[in-house]
Image: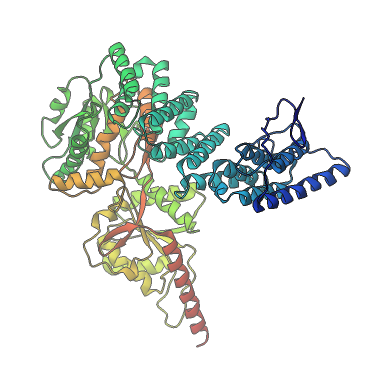
Amino acid sequence: MAVRARSFEIRYDRNEPQFPTSRSSRTNIMRKGVRFLLLVLLCALALASCAPQKNIVSAPGRTGLPGHKAQDPRQALEKYGKYLAATHPGDPARVEAWKNTVDSAIQLGDYALAEKSLRQWQFESGKTVASWPWNQSHAHLLWASKGRGAYTAYLSNLMERKDLEWPTREAAGRELSGHFWEHGEYSLAFDAMGFLYRNTSGASAKGALESDALARAESLSPDELQKVLDSSLGADPTTYPWSTVVWAQSMKRLDRDKDSWPSVWPSLSGIVNSGELANRDFFAGSLHTLEQKLGAVRQSLVLLLPLSGPYSKVGWQIAKGADCAWRENKALSATPEIKLINTESPTFLEELQSIPNTPLVGGPLRKNVWEKIRMAGLNRSIRFLTFLPSVEDEGREAWRFFSSPEDQARALVKGCNLLGITSFAILHPQDRFGMAMTSVFQDEVYSTGGQLPVVRGYDMDNPPTWTKAVGAVLGASDAKNSMNPEPPFQAVFLPDSMFRVQQLAPLFHYYEEKRLVLLGPQAWSQSMGGGGLEMQYFDLAVFPGAWDPSLDSGNAARLRQGMIEGGGRADMWAALGYDFVRFTALLGGGQGSAENFNLSLAQSASRMPWTMAPMHWTNGRVRQELFLFQPTPSGMVRASMDKIRNVRAQRQGQREERRTQLSGQ
């Protein structure tokens, strides 16, 4: 089939688009320049056609390249070239002709020709580079010539550019999200959709994005949905697009097991009551239908805390943090009612037993109280999330909402590995805490393939012997004008109080060993900010912690403000209570069997926007990914591994200078 033009004939097959012709007119300077370049292009194609023909074979990994695909890309290039030569700049169909010219060159594998065509297109109109068709062709060329990473990076940068008009940025975001989805990178696809949603105005446009995200989420398996949430890094589960993922996951779980309704309901209710969605009526109607069918859910929550006696200060901090979370969300039906029980009361067991409907219980905080609960057998009928570092039968008859010594050791060893440190020493007090932490740290070092050549204890009640203990760890002597031997480790674990470590740390400097990283337990965080810390001994000190006072997340800011309004101050214990209430609102009760409860713990943790260091559960056993801090005279700050690395390098240089000095004497 042929279309007769005024001065030329275009032949095409039915798969190629037809372009309208335009009436000839006087050419201007720009058109002459473009026509000249196009004549060069046509000549090049003519010469190529005279050469021996070769089959065009796609390069490995390039078979899925996007863009226009012509049945005969050489013929397509000639056709589009003739069309561009015969029409004027400003003809609407020229955009598609230019775009298909670039894509046909890419299809041939002639990236130089594609690049040249892009520049000719740009030369024709300076505004072209701000348009989506030109940028889309450029993105396709980048993928073909430089790889998929260059393509996705270009699109990501394009949608972030505020100097471009929104239609171009929106189109880039849509192509990027579609690309990630086609390649099974669902979390990245949802990230791109989230960008579009945040920058889109109008309920209709937002509603369309919500429908699209929900349809995509519903097409995924439960395992795939969980992977998406696991990679969302604590994003708010009530905000788009993660709310659609949580909704789809919850509905799939409910389809499999109607008994999971009490644990599914908090997530659905939180999404509806957040007020963040344009399609709120749809979600609210769906939830209402489920409530009529499966019944309304009433949550209750008990906190077992020491509200009098020597631990009352800690207990009340937890309670105040919990109250902040309750007051913050009391308008939402997902927020459970809270009952406080004082574990120092002789009747606390009777109070606990008298509460109906087998609530979820937070606490206790002390081991001896937990033993009383176990002796009474209450742990077999009530779900306890204890604030203890360890419990028997974890994941079966007891659970934790607290860090463990293993979490502390793991954070320290992992941080040292980032510094290239894999060999350690331990200098510990000969008390129960020191011995227990030593055992845990040893296990962690060995499990990660590290070395532990030196382990030594000291009498915590006999400070005059500490100098000798440090010297023994270093293999040092008191001989003057001699270098102590190179220690077979680069970090030393000191599981003792900060008070005693402030006396131990200078002893390493006494033996001229200033390069070691000093590792401490989480207990150091309770002794920060008192002043008097000599930083020359602690600029290479690191310890773990669950609460970062400088965290600038929205949740942390709300906790700090809530505590100030209540006449208090946010700390790790307040954050514990605050996150506990918010987490149980997602969790939604005891969920019958231990297996169902364990599943709810894992899924709720992946949706939780944590204020503390994140927790996650595997088969009911919790791990907390603790932060790493460094001590300062005014308090603790997040550890900077780059800073520590630089200080160690500087100290190593000083060590070499000292060695040179002594060898010259």
Residues 93 and 329: in front is 93
Image location of residue 629, percent across then percent down: 34, 56
Q: Is 523 above or below relative to 375?
A: below
Q: Residue furthest top?
A: 293
Image location of residue 25, percent across then percent down: 67, 43
Image location of residue 472, percent across then percent down: 40, 67
Residues 398 and 547: in front is 547
Quarter of the rendering occupied by the N terminus: top right
Q: Is residue 103 visible?
A: yes
Residues 484 and 233: in front is 233
Residue drawn at x 80%, y 44% as measured from the top left: 45
Residue drawn at x 60%, y 42% as measured from the top left: 90
Specify whether 287 is left or right of 87.
Answer: left
Task: Determine the image quadrant of residue 203.
Answer: top left
Q: Is 123 above or below relative to 180?
A: below
Residues 117 and 457: in front is 117
Q: Is residue 12 visible?
A: no
